[in-house]
Amino acid sequence: MIKQLPLLLAILFFSSCIKDEAPNPEADIVAISFTENSLRTKSIDIYNDYIVLYPKRSVQLQASDIVSIELSEGASYRARNHATPGDTLFFIDVTSQSKEYTKTYSVIQVNDFPLNFGFETWVRPSSGFLYENPKEGPLQWYSSNNGVAIAWNSSSKKADEYPVRPKHIAGNTAVELRTMTGPGEIAGGVTYIPCLAGSLYLGGFSPLMGLIDPLKATLFGVPFNSGKPVKLTGFYIYKEGVEDYINGNGDRDATKKDKCSIYAVLFKTGDNVEFLYGDNIDDSPNIIARAEVPPENIRQETDFVYFEAGFDYLSYAVPFAWNELDNNEYKLTIVFASSYRGGYYEGRPGNTLIIDNVQLIYETNDE
Amino acid sequence: MKPMTNKILFLKQGAIILLLCFPSLRASAENTAPSWEFKINAGYNLGATSPLSLPAEIRKIEKYSPSGIAPHFALEATRWLNEKWGISAQMTLDHKGFTVRDEVKSLHTEIDMKDEKFTGNFTGKNTTEIRNVYLSLPVLATRRISDKWLVQAGFYLAYLYHPHFNGSVSGGSIRKDSPIGEKTLVDHASFDFSKEQNALDYGVLLAGERVFYSNFALRGQLSWGLKPLFPSGFTGITFKMYNIYGLIGISYRLNI
């Protein structure tokens, strides 16, 4: 009993002073739904301050089409029309229960898949960080910048300090992906990042998983119903870094070669498959076809090199079906990376991949 | 009481000087007057380095455990002014610490990294371990109530000789900069604020003693720090924490 006494006293002391819970300061949209059959996807991508919708053809969504919305506990919202609706349809202001904070969500719609990716337009996707990602019309590219921002957690790092940045060449803007030395152990051992590689892809990003499981944070795939992909074409400049290769455990290896990645994957969504992830993009059973520039064919030139990679349908078990395409069951991703195993925090710092004028060539069903 | 000797008169200048001279004093103490009294105290510190009232961000205290070994040692000199009143000075070594495991909600914190600060609002579990060792100099008014009882009240000034304030957060999430920032799950992250702590502490002391056998007395004491543990510019913890510790110990009066 004597032994327990201090503990009892302490519990009495502390429990008597635990205050009532403060009003919730969070102002999140947790879930949202729109009029049935208006969207091409089953789930809706909700980010910290924007929402991406893929509406069906000829559907024009408005704030009044919101069927249900789930907010942080106690929060309230108000939808606000965009003065000139375009890619941003409208805004949703969410005010926290505590009334201290109001967060504005932009609701963005993405319609047809772009014919050409020129990387001319760059935007700052997150208000808390300075990094930029390219955007083609309303379709946003995601990149390793999203994850790197969380690892660095720096409001002051400039856009061109990130692994993915715009590169101005002969009056045009291209995208430059770079591999660099990582921050090592971050924030008291949250995770260990010896190497940061540049990667760029179509899909989404889960900041929630950004630190604890980066491979699960990269979400590959955007809805694709334009046609049957035939080939991926574009231009690159690749330069291998001169520093030692850094392994995932931080060990350096002077002899190990690195290579870049250029590929695209078409896959079928299902009940539990909305996206592919860093850990199954190569071998998911949902893959229908894949196009890749084989690493051994990548040349190191000072000027742009044209690439063309045909989609291989034969090596994958899931057959392509036009009705499934029309039924919005397919997703597609295009991926570029400055290091082959960048997702595992591996690579050769200094590795650089510049990409421009990417096209996805597809055939349509004329029957 | 015997009349005071010149030597003692010389030492009358102040309790702190007296303390500094303690070893030499003791050596020559055989012919001192009984109006001086010297003690050795030993005890166990039990308490918390805590905000005065828990901030709303702390939702639950899951576990509190006092430090396994949290000793208190003191050398005390008392100059009796009359039968009832005296002035005491001590030189003490105190281990103040505990471990607490709690649940926090939207607690703002800032963790120093190599060249950046990891700033945000954390929700989840937190474990904090404090094992600070202080050297302190209390000055006390001493009141003799009876042959057996005495009480003391006064101030102390303490120097943080060995700082130790660290811990970890786990099983939660952090939001960048504010409660509406981007949210990221955090498995485990550790922090070490040892060196951020103020090197000095001061506060008030209350104590009572009861003689239970010969020269031995049971001693109880409360020390209440008035200076926050961290400097005002420190942003790792947003609320002010104070050293609030009780002590249970034994006092031994030296026959000199």
Image (spheres, rainbow, N blue to C red):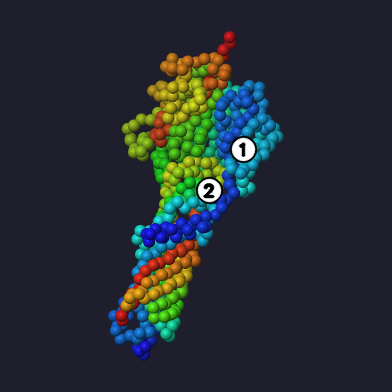
The image's mark for residue A302 is none
- For residue A247, which quarter of the picture? top left
Query: In 3D space, how far apart are the residues under numbered discs 1 and 2 (Cα atoms)?
Result: 21 Å
Q: Tell me which residue sits at (60%, 25%) in the image.
A: A39
Q: Secondary structure at mark 2?
A: strand
Residue matched to label 1: A105
Is B152 on the left or on the right of B176, as rendered? left
Q: Tell me which residue sits at (37%, 36%) in the image.
A: A248
- List x then y, in percent, for residue B186: 46, 43
A225 relative to B72, above or below: above
A88 relative to B158, above or below: above
- List x then y, in percent, for residue B228: 49, 62
Three-letter residue code for mark 1: Tyr
Mark 1 on the same chain as mark 2: no
Q: Tell me which residue sits at (41%, 29%) in the image.
A: A340
Three-letter residue code for mark 2: Ser
User: What subunit carries mark 1?
Assistant: A
Q: Residue furthest bottom?
A: B3
Choose between B113 and A79: the one closer to the eye.
A79
Residue matched to label 2: B106
